[in-house]
């Protein structure tokens, strides 16, 4: 898909939630394939040095800005993005769409009990027919090809991969040819943890204020401090470095 901007070495499409959903739905109806990705401050920082991650993200067909910091940076760098499209919100909207249109989904990632609960909740809230299959996110590099083939053969129209970066981006990019049988593929990070109730999502006011990262940090400080405190500082530095460079 054309019409992207380039922000700190990352392609980003200037799309609203509704525009993204319409593109995906239209693609599925036409039997086409879309590889979707999102970027936030932490991922953009990682992409500066991780060439494989940068290739995996920029190789996607649609890349949304997931993270208020990216929206702010786009305005500072005079390339304003119209709306934040959070991966978890897009996923929830797509599951709803799948239910109404008769599409099937495959859930890959998280621990067995977490992904099992997500699938069970979807079956109860929507229907048994919604689920094409599911699998936990713990597997070796050698198992990847077989898992990708299993997903491709499942009859799924949508694949949601709830694994941390950069593994999920690299998995989707490396196995993109096999996964072309699935109309839509995307990484959803820790979304299964939120949907299952293992972790809580920040209140709406914190999401809109760009403080969602801080809410997550408070829940898991030992695991998240480096990602957020160091990552966010680096992102701010990169943004202003780029701004003054362009001046």
Image: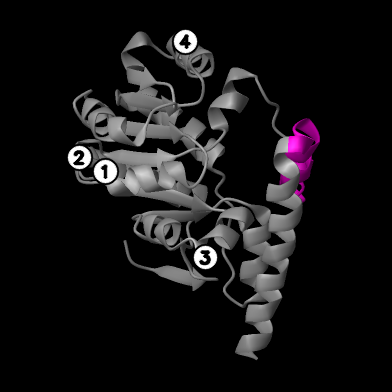
Residues drawn in magenta? 204-222
Q: Secondary structure at mark 1?
A: loop
Q: Where, by quadrant of the figure, is residue 138 drawn?
A: top left
The residues tagged by marks 1 and 4 sit, at their Cα atoms, a distance apart of 27 Å
Which secondary structure dominates the residues rendered in magenta?
helix
Could you give the CA–CA distance between mark 3 and mark 2, rounded to whole angstroms? 28 Å
Q: Which mark is residue 178?
A: 2
Horizontal relation, residue 191 to residue 187: left or right: right
Determine the residue positioned at 65% across, 20% down.
198
In the picture of the structure, the residue carrying the numbered disc 1 is 175
Q: Tell me where residue 157 appears, x and y as whole percent.
A: 28, 31
**In whole angstroms, how far apart are the C-alphas of marks 3 and 1?**
22 Å
Q: Which mark is residue 49?
A: 3
Mark 3, secondary structure of its residue? helix
Q: Earlier in the sequence, mark 3 or mark 2?
A: 3
Mark 2–mark 4 Cα distance, whole angstroms, equals: 27 Å
Tell whether label 2 touches label 1 (CB within 8 Å).
yes
Q: How is the image coloured?
A: one colour
C-alpha gap between disc 1 and disc 2 = 6 Å
Q: Viewer-nearest of labels 2 and 4?
A: 2
Q: Residues within 10 Å of mark 2 (few under 14, many from 20)?
A: some
Q: Secondary structure at mark 2?
A: helix
């Amino acid at each position: 898909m054309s019409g992207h901007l380039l922000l700190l070495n990352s392609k980003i499409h200037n799309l609203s939630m509704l525009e993204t959903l319409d593109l995906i739905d239209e693609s599925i109806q036409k039997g086409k394939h879309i590889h979707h990705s999102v970027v936030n401050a932490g991922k953009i920082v990682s992409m500066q040095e991780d060439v494989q991650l940068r290739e995996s993200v920029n190789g996607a067909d649609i890349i949304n800005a997931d993270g208020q910091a990216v929206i702010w940076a786009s305005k500072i760098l005079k390339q304003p993005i119209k709306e934040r499209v959070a991966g978890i919100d897009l996923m929830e909207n797509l599951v709803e769409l799948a239910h109404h249109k008769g599409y099937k989904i495959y859930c890959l990632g998280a621990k067995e009990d977490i992904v099992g609960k997500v699938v069970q909740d979807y079956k109860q809230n929507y229907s048994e027919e919604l689920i094409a299959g599911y699998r936990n996110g713990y597997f070796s590099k050698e198992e990847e090809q077989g898992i990708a083939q299993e997903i491709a053969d499942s009859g799924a129209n949508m694949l949601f991969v709830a694994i941390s970066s950069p593994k999920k981006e690299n998995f989707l990019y490396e196995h993109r040819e096999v996964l072309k049988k699935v109309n839509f593929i995307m990484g959803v990070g820790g979304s299964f943890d939120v949907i299952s109730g293992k972790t809580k999502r920040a209140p709406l006011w914190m999401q809109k204020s760009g403080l969602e990262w801080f809410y997550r940090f408070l829940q898991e400080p030992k695991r998240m401090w480096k990602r957020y405190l160091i990552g966010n500082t680096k992102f701010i530095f990169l943004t202003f470095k780029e701004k003054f460079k362009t001046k």
